[in-house]
Amino acid sequence: MKKCTLMVMIGYLCLIPVLGQCQVDKKFDRPPDKGGSRIRAEDLRVVKLEFSPDPAREGQWISFRLTVVNESRHSERISLTLKDRDEVITEVRDVNISPGENRIYFLERDYRFSRSDHCFTVEAEIEQRKRLIQMIEEFCARKTSRGWTLSDRRVGLLFVQDLDMSPDPATSGQAVRFRVRLRNNGRPLRGNIRIQDKDQVVAQVRNAVILTGNHDFEFPHTQYIFQRTDHCFTVLVDFESTPYVVDAAREFCAKPLGWTLRP
């Protein structure tokens, strides 16, 4: 009798972990409540945001697209709204979000950039509630001489400290020579340095070595023709076969006072 009781107790003790595991499995395998969403805003992340054309000029029609990662195991049809602060830019409704990466395309529209900073957010409407989605980084449009851009086409820690020309002032068609002072706060690099007026190449130094620190680069003489009322220059560096716009301390524009770059 004692032996029988002992065996029953041992069997019961062995059964307890199995029952406990079943209860845990049932808890996690339980289907969602009827009418409830199977994904949450916390499951979603925006990993990429782009617009086209990039760069875009004022008043130009542009289309936005983003990449959303769904970290849950479920698919869901939701609505997404792209915003600039409190302003709704565009939205897409009843789009299917599957596990993993999802490419979302918004309709083209004539969005106007009117401030100095334009940083975007994305809202998801789930169960008739709007919630902000986590962005892996700030997606902010910045103004360049070619228009507004979301792409980070800049060379790391390069900075244009000064741009001047000689003679200054100059007459239209006169041979002038440009000089650029660059500050490199990163590692040394090698590439072509170009000065551009919009899409026109004004002067170029090929295969320049840009060491860490402040350095002046003299460009060959050019008979650049000043013929418009506005001539604003940008500096680009071709690094690893890719052109990058270098950030500048100020706008470098030649004024029609005998054409001068002096502030």
Image (cartoon, rainbow, N blue to C red):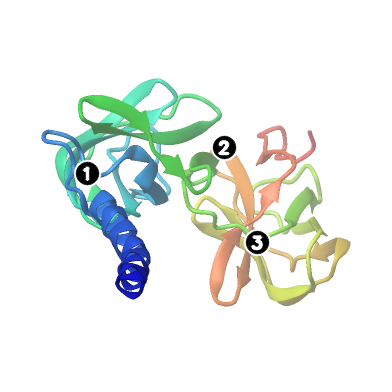
**Residue position marked by numbered label 2 in the rendering:** 230
Pick whichever of labels 1 and 3 is earlier in the sequence: 1
Pick whichever of labels 2 and 3 is earlier in the sequence: 3
Q: Nearer the viewer, residue 72 or 231?
A: 72
Q: Can you say whether 162 is above or below 113 in the image?
A: below
Q: Examine the rendering and report whether any part of residue 206 can be seen.
A: no
**Label ID, residue 155:** 3
**Residue position marked by numbered label 1 in the rendering:** 38
**Location of residue 67 in the rendering, given as x and y in whole percent from the top left corner:** 33, 53
Compared across the picture, whether 174 is left or right of 45 comes to right
How far apart marks 1 and 3 lie (CA) works out to: 43 Å
Q: Can you say whether 262 is above or below 210 in the image?
A: above
**Residue in the picture at 70% in, 54% down:** 174
Query: What residue type is disc 1 on?
Result: Arg
Callout 1–callout 3 Cβ contact below 8 Å: no
Pick whichever of labels 2 and 1 is earlier in the sequence: 1
Query: What residue type is disc 2 on?
Result: Asp
Q: Nearer the viewer, residue 259 or 262?
A: 262
Query: What residue type is disc 3 on?
Result: Val
**Residue in the picture at 23% in, 48% down:** 105
**Label ID, residue 140:** none
